[in-house]
Structures are given as C-alpha cells and as structure tokens.
Image (spheres, rainbow, N blue to C red):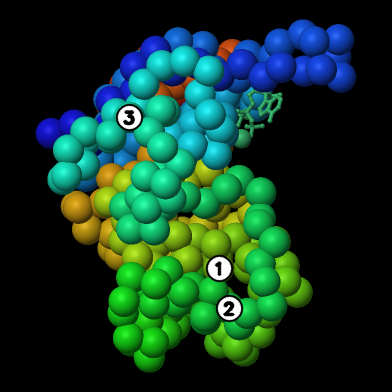
Amino acid sequence: MTVLSVDGLSKTFDMHVLGDTQVVGLDDVSFDVREGEFLAVVGESGSGKSSLLKCLYRTYDPSSGEVVYHSPDGDIDLASCPDRTVIDLRGDSIGYTSQFLDEIPRVPAVDVVARPLIEQGVDREDARSVARDLLSALSVPESLWQAYPATFSGGERQRVNLAQALAPKPDLLLLDEPTSALDPDTRRAAIDLLSTYLGSETTVVGVFHNTDVVDAVADRVVVLDDGRLQRVVPTEAYDEEVVLG
Ligand SMILES: Nc1ncnc2c1ncn2[C@@H]1O[C@H](COP(=O)(O)OP(=O)(O)OP(=O)(O)O)[C@@H](O)[C@H]1O
Ligand SMILES: [Mg+2]
C-alpha cells in the first residue's frame, strides 16, 4: 500500500536580495512511499534533500505539485490542506527532525523526549520511562538525563532530537540527517534503535549522507540531483552503483 504520493513537487525561492532572481530547490519531483518502508533520500549538498522533507512537513509551502498522504481517515494533500490540518497531523501522525539542531527550551532532556507522548495522553511516568529507555539506547549518559539540552554537545543534542521524534512512533517519520553529528559507535546505536524501536507501522523518509547508514536501514533510495529526481532504486541496486563508482 502507498502511504504518500508525491506528484510534480516543485519549490522555488524568490531571492529579493539577489535582484528578484529565483533559486530552484525542487523541480517536478514525483515518487511514492510505501507503507512501512524506510526510504532514504540522497544527493549532493544543495540537491534539494532538506527542501523535499520541508515540503513534506509543510515547513515550506510547495510552489506546485501534490503530496497526498493516504491517511486512515482518507486522502489529504499536504501541499494544499489548511494549516489547521497540518498542525493536527504533526501532533499524532507525522514526525520530523530538522538537519540543524533546534533551540531546545530549558527543560530536562528526559522531559523533552517524554513531551510528545504526554501530549498523546500517555501517563507522565510511563512517558518518562520510555524517554529514559530511548536516551539509554542512544548512549546519552544517565548524568545528563535531568540536565538541559541547551548545554549539550552537538551529538548529544542530536540524540535528544532523534529520541523525541521516535518516542511517539508516528505513522510517517521524516528525518533530516539524524546521525550526522554522531561518532561511529553512537551512530551504530542510533541505527539499531531505528530498526528495533519502530515497528512496521512506521514509514520513514530519511536523508543520509553516509552510505553505510543507507545500507543498514533503507529499503529503497531516492536520488536527487540539482533539485530533480534522478531515480528511485532498491538499496541493493544503489549499493552496486556506489561500488562501481
Ligand atoms: N529558505 C531558502 N531560501 C532560499 N533558498 C533556499 C532555501 N532553502 C533551500 N534553498 C536552496 O535550495 C537548494 C537546495 O537546498 P537544500 O537545503 O534542500 O539542499 P540539501 O540537499 O539539503 O543540501 P545539504 O546536503 O547541504 O543539506 C539550495 O540551492 C539552497 O540554497
Ligand atoms: Mg540538507
């Protein structure tokens, strides 16, 4: 079953500082995402990976095209539905971590991770217990669980962000380079967690630079080049291309 149908998606940016020129972020991109699959998005820097995820999450208003989310309650075009609908979906159905670390308020790490669960109605102590399990699985030292992530290292904050996004097990999870700041051991822990914590009910679209990570987690790979979709291939086929150079 298809969970997301991206059709003719484009995003251009009007650059007033550059004398009203336009920068193309995405150009007529179409692909489907199957329910429960892990789809990796790869491509060179500036190829439109983050723009794609932001259009799916509606951080960016697409310039044209459709992003149809086949939700249990019917089809919703994420490119054009009302803001209110997007906000409701973000609460429960669609999760996202940005490539760059968000400012995190002065809240202990364990509560940052527990918050989405509590908002879903999970009991506060149960939510904290899940949060501790996630932080532990990501090797965030126990001494930091009650501390404020504002003071954490980049890699520690990235793990808090990832734990927060994973915690509620959204139907669709959008991850923009969630392991970029991690060393090989913690990256391995994050990859293990992605495959053990999320069941087959969660569909993931994740941007990754590292081919080892793509190898370990992805079912299929979307290759972007200069804002355009180059191809969508099974991970094994993508591996062969990388090996052949
Ligand atoms: N808010 C914006 N305003 C103007 N241009 C933007 C904006 N966001 C993205 N772009 C442009 O769109 C193009 C694609 O950027 P994007 O961030 O999607 O690339 P990326 O593939 O995620 O790169 P990286 O691997 O470096 O993160 C770039 O040319 C970028 O300058
Ligand atoms: Mg990016």
Q: Position of residue 134 (x, y in %)?
A: 42, 74
Q: Position of residue 63 (x, y in %)?
A: 53, 18
Q: Is residue 219 placed above or below 96 in the rendered structure?
A: above
The Cα–Cα distance between marks 3 and 1, rounded to whole angstroms, is: 30 Å
Q: Where, quadrant-wise, is the N terminus in this rendering?
A: top left
The amino acid at mark 1 is Val
Q: Nearer the viewer, mark 2 or mark 3?
A: 3
The Cα–Cα distance between marks 2 and 1, rounded to whole angstroms, is: 7 Å
Residue bearing mark 2 = 109
Going from the N terminus, do you reach mark 3 or mark 1 first?
A: 3
Residue at figure coordinates x 52%, y 51% from the top left? 97
Residue at figure coordinates x 69%, y 61% from the top left? 103
Near mark 1 (Cα within 10 A), the count class, few <14, some 14-19 or many ≥20, is many
Q: Is residue 107 left or right of residue 123?
A: right
The Cα–Cα distance between marks 2 and 3, rounded to whole angstroms, is: 34 Å
The amino acid at mark 3 is Asp
Question: In this view of the protein, which residue sits in the foreground, 37 or 138?
Answer: 37
Going from the N terminus, do you reach mark 2 or mark 3 first?
A: 3
Q: Say if mark 2 contacts mark 1, CB within 8 Å.
A: yes
Quarter of the rendered structure image containing ligand 2: top right
Q: Position of residue 31 (x, y in %)?
A: 32, 20
Dividing the picture into quarters, in which one does residue 21 lie? top right
Residue bearing mark 1 = 160
Q: Is residue 29 placed above or below 91 in the rendered structure?
A: above
Q: Is residue 105 left or right of residue 209?
A: right
Q: Secondary structure at mark 3?
A: strand
Residue bearing mark 3 = 77
Question: In this view of the protein, which residue sits in the foreground, 195 or 86?
Answer: 86
Residue at figure coordinates x 28%, y 34% from the top left? 76
